[in-house]
Image (cartoon, rainbow, N blue to C red):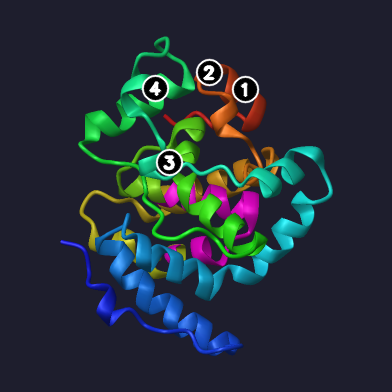
Amino acid sequence: MLESTSSLPKLPENPSLFTRLRVGLQALKVLQVEPTNPAYGALFYDSVEIGLCAALARDFSRHEEGRRLLAERPSLRASALDMDALEKLPSGSLGHTFARYFRDQGLSPIETLSPPKNDAQYVATRLRETHDFHHLVTGYDTDVMGEMELQAFTLGNLHLRTSFLILLQTAKLPQRVPGFDAAQYARRLWAAFRRGSQSRQLASFRWEDNWATPLAMLREQLVAPAPQWN
């Protein structure tokens, strides 16, 4: 059950860094249980990432792909997607794989409650809505290990504070989960971080222009090769 928005923490006008981190951590606690909660997802990014998102928006304005995103503000929220049509695209395409990814897990894409008011908020919304595309293109699973690898990849690729906070909160995971090897966990996170830093920055990529593109081709174009583990 989704956490009630009546208990949603509020950010004051011009909050200090301490206040933004405090509210962001409160939102993170909810998101660890309800990762698709749209209200707390937006609050988390507004608290922790809005400065970086403003910087990314400025970067977008310097190239054609980014300027087009800011001008058109396309949305990948659940209500804007026709999952049945996407699933009918050729097997192996981004659209077909994306639709099957959610069908197989019994999940829905993230919903966005309200339109962004400015470019920085749009970038923040875009980052939340494209999280699962990053799973697909990197190949990282949605289990605990895969989620942490994707956070490490995102930290290397976009330098998100949110990814750092999530990794920090789960630093003791190998001690709490049976079968986790601490040394291997650290190696995999470091490899994912390096892979993210060596890959194309994903924030401005137009996923919606590539529904029919083979996912294998996008992986070759967008991300550095994954290391092979024994």
Crowding at mark 2 (Cα within 10 Å: few <14, some 14-19, many 20+): few
Disc 2 from disc 1: Cα separation: 6 Å
Crowding at mark 4 (Cα within 10 Å: few <14, some 14-19, many 20+): some
Q: Which residues are magenta?
A: 148-166
106 relative to 99 in the view: left or right = left
**Quadrant housing residue 10:** bottom left
Front disc: 4 or 2: 4
Q: Is residue 158 magenta?
A: yes
Q: What secondary structure is found at the residue carrying circle 3?
A: helix
Q: Label 1: which residue?
A: 220
Q: Label 3: which residue?
A: 132
Q: Position of residue 55 (x, y in %)?
A: 73, 63
Disc 1 from disc 3: Cα separation: 18 Å
**Quadrant housing residue 199:** top right
Q: Answer with mark 4 or mark 2, whichever residue precedes in sequence.
A: 4
Q: Label 4: which residue?
A: 86
Q: How many marks?
A: 4
Front disc: 4 or 1: 4
Q: Label 2: which residue?
A: 216
